[in-house]
Every structure is written in C-alpha cells, then in structure tokens.
Amino acid sequence: MEEMAAEPVTTASNPDRRRALWLLMGGAAAAACRKKRKLPAPVPARPGAVETGIASWYGYPYHGRRTASGEIYDMEKLTAAHRTLPFGTWVEVTNLDNRKRVRVRITDRGPFVEGRIIDLSLAAAREIDMVRAGIVKVRVQVVSGPAAAGGRFAVQVGAYLNRENAERMRRRLQAQYRRCRLVKRDGPTVLWRVLIGEETSEERARVLAAQLRPDFGTVFVVRLDEPAGDEL
C-alpha cells in the first residue's frame, strides 16, 4: 500500500499575488508557501491508495451552497472536498491522534491550503472528534470510486481576490503557455484561480507542476471537472 502526501498550496512570486493570498489564508500560511517544498504526489483514484496529511472541516457559511460537483452542500452529511479525486469517490479518513474513522464521499474541491489534503463536512468532523481542534493529521484511504476515473488535469499557479489581477496574470502567461485559464471559485469570498495546462493524466500534470514550481513556488495539481462550470 503506497503512502503519499499532498501537493502543496499554490503561491506566487510577486507582491500583489502574495497579498491576495494573505487576505485569503492569513500571513502564516503564505509565509510557509514561500519555502517551495517539494512534496510527494496526491493520492490516485484506485482503491487502497493512501495519503497522509492535514484535514480541516467546513460548515457555515458554505452550508446550503452549491459545491463544485453541483450538489448542494449539507454539512450534516458525510461528504468531503479533495483537489483531485473524482466526484463520487468514497474514502476512509482516520484521525491519527485518536484512531477514529469515518467514510465520506467526495463532492467538492479543496482545500487550497498548504499541507491540507481533505476538507470534511461538519458531520464527518464530529465522527472523528476533530471539530474543536479544527485541523488534525489524518490518513486518507480510497475505498471505491466511479467506474470512469479518467479526466483532465491542470496546475494551479495563482489565486486572486481581484479578477482584474487574475486576468492580468492570465494574459501574461498565455504568451508562454498553450493553455491558461481562470476558474471562479464561489463562496463567501470569491476566488479567481489561475490554471495552466490540460493534461490527460494526473501523472502528466505532476510533471508539469514540477516544471512550473521553480517559477511559481508551491503549486497545486487540480482536476478539471466536467462540466467545466465556471471556467473563463
């Protein structure tokens, strides 16, 4: 059984980009992103695959909002967000502090914070006794997934609160990279994510991420979900 950790959070090299991320994640997280740590790849979608990292949970104000899969988020259901696993994948999450376990279905995308590998619903967080702690170290094992687990993958290289800044970055990158897009992430705080590439496998996207990391710092491999949703 293969042990893996998560891809690190995306960051940026210029001051405007760093300020946007500080507003979103806080100065401490942004400072950690600048270290450009090379971490192992995220978990593939095959049953039995395992990754270890930090879990967080989310409730209000996301409760009742539409998730990246199109489902309405219900914080009292056993669901979770993951950056690359296909929607509908079932995983078992083990709190490594107390060994409590819960099985959840992937319905959303995230978390986009360095070191975090899964974002649990409030109900799932209760099951493994992590609500008060907020974040805990966990082991995530794929239990089952959809029959068709292919897809398209890209690399997230920036994230902005201001759409004009994101558009400016995309225009600059389009001269160098064949496929560059903006993806809008809705929520209490709207986030404009800048993605490069359109690879047919997660492995190819990881190769692209390794090439981009020296220029952009820490980057994310992300799944391009169908339907494309709010791609711009």
Image: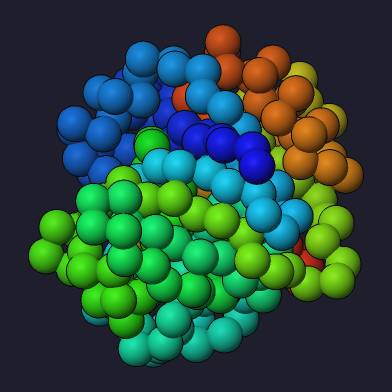
Q: Residue at x 51, y 18 (%)?
A: 38
Residue 162, compared with residue 220, is above or below; it is: below
Which quadrant of the figure has residue 225?
bottom right
Say which quadrant the C terminus sits in: bottom right
Between 114 and 25, the residue placed more toward the observer is: 114
Percent across and percent down for residue 17 are: 39, 30
Percent across and percent down for residue 113 are: 37, 43
Which quadrant of the figure has residue 167?
top right
Between 52 and 87, the residue placed more toward the observer is: 52
* Left or right, 123 with reference to 169: left
Q: Is residue 165 visible?
A: no
Q: Residue at x 41, y 72 (%)?
A: 102
Q: Residue at x 71, y 59 (%)?
A: 47
* Left or right, 62 with reference to 107: left
Between 204 and 17, the residue placed more toward the observer is: 204
- Image colouring: rainbow
Q: Is residue 151 visible?
A: yes
